[in-house]
Amino acid sequence: MEIIAYLIPIALFLGLLGLVAFLWCLKSGQFEDLDGAAERILLNDDEKPGKQG
């Protein structure tokens, strides 16, 4: 039963750490361009503009 005395603070600390990481991601702009990565996968990187071979 005394293990709960260790697990509750650890769980609270990890939850707070996750919240801080999420807020840091919001502040640094990680979620600004949600459609860019989805559209970037459709582009063909092998074709270079201006070069024809």
Image: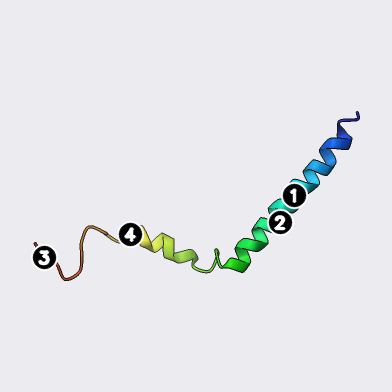
**Which structural element holds mark 4?**
loop
Residue corresponding to mark 3: 52
Residue 21 appears at what percent x and percent y? Answer: 66, 56
Report which residue position mark 4 lands on.
42
Residue tagged by mark 1?
15
Q: Would you call the spot at circle 4 few (<14 residues within 10 Å), some (14-19), or many (20 or more)?
A: few
Single out the residue that lies furthest toward the top: 1
Judged by depth in the image, the label closer to the viewer, 4 or 2, is 2
How far apart marks 3 and 1 lie (CA) works out to 54 Å
* Residue plotted at (62% across, 65% down): 26
Q: Is residue 9 above or below residue 45?
A: above
Are circles 1 and 2 on residues that touch, CB within 8 Å? yes
Q: Residue at x 72, y 52 (%)?
A: 17
Q: CA distance from mark 2 to mark 3?
A: 50 Å
The image shows residue 28, relative to residue 12, as above or below, that is below
Is the C-beta separation of discs 3 and 1 under 8 Å? no
Q: Splitting the image into 4 quarters, where does residue 41 fall?
A: bottom left
Give how far across and how far down residue 28 sits, in percent.
Answer: 58, 67
Residue topped by disc 2: 19
Q: Nearer the viewer, residue 36 or 14?
A: 14
Three-letter code, disc 4: Leu
Instruction: Specify which label sits upstream in the sequence, 3 or 1.
Output: 1
